[in-house]
Image (tube, rainbow, N blue to C red):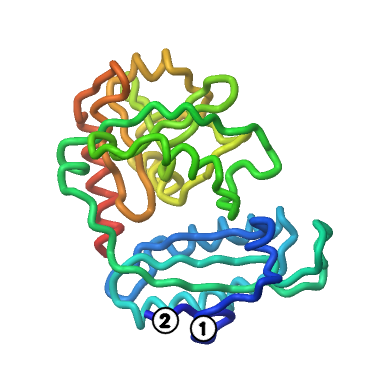
Amino acid sequence: MDCWVDGQPADSLSLKDRGLAYGDGLFETFAVRNGQPILLDRHLARLAEGCVRLAIAADIQLIRQELLSYAAAMGEGVLKLILTRGDGLRGYAPDPAAPGRRVLQGNPPSAYPAAHAEQGVRLFPCSTRLAKQPLLAGLKHLNRLEQVLARAEWQDSEHAEGLMLDQAGRVVEGVFSNIFLVRDGVLITPDLKRCGVAGVMRAEILFQAESLAIPTQIADISLEQLQWADEVFICNSVYGVWPVRAYAALSWPVGPLTRKLQTIARALLDA
């Protein structure tokens, strides 16, 4: 399907775009089912927060309408929205009056092995560390060089995802997912106040867990705490939930809470 730029079919982008020059922008990746972008409100809420924090001009209602129109034409697949600050002159200083630029790209549905969801995955121990930057923490901004470097660390099919730590050795996230662990019935996920992406599936899982009266905790997690976990799983808004069965020398069973939340996530993505 053709890309759209500012609501119109296009196959090119201005060389002056600040997203290209500086990674000055945000993006969202949606699963599209039956012509509908899944978890649309959560994606747009995160996008709106990012626009406020980066001071990027954006009409969220216009973006919503374009997403709905594009998804309806797609039918099924993965839709990526890129929002940049638009064109700029040479230099870092942004133009506060510059309108944001909207780019929509459609791709076929992701074809992950069924074993990832059924039997669980092994995580690669990434040596690339996430830098501390509270001003950007939680946002899905366009500068993904840390993730690019981390993903380049493995090429084998044994590892489906990599685990990323911060500079202090705290567990933060996967390269393209968020991580949860279960300990004594409590669902725990890393605090993302220093770095990392606050995923929309992560937010949905926390919401669903609280609705089911499952105790939840957002906290710093060390590798030692990971070792003590009863269950571990990762999630994102495209594949849902994958149990984690191994990381380095550590291993875990696919537990009942993982399966419960995986079923909920699958129902959301199949809606």
Q: Quadrant of residue 106?
A: bottom left
Percent x, y of residue 116: 21, 42
Q: Quadrant of the N terminus?
A: bottom left
Left or right of 260, for residue 79? right
Left or right of 180, for residue 148? right
Q: Is residue 192 above or below residue 148?
A: above
The answer to whether residue 213 is visible is: no
The answer to whether residue 173 is visible is: yes
Q: Would you call the spot at circle 2 few (<14 residues within 10 Å), some (14-19), or many (20 or more)?
A: some
Q: CA distance from mark 1 to mark 2?
A: 7 Å
Foreground residue among 183 and 71: 71
**Identity of the residue drawn at 42% across and 45% down:** 176
Instruction: Say which residue label 1 marks.
Output: 10
Q: How many marks?
A: 2
SS category of the residue bearing label 1: strand
Percent x, y of residue 113: 18, 48
**Identity of the residue drawn at 49% across and 40% down:** 149
Residue type indicated by callout 1: Ala
SS category of the residue bearing label 2: loop
Residue type indicated by callout 2: Asp
Instruction: Say which residue label 2 marks.
Output: 2
Percent x, y of residue 227: 35, 15
**Identity of the residue drawn at 47% across and 75% down:** 67
**Identity of the residue drawn at 27% across and 41% down:** 242
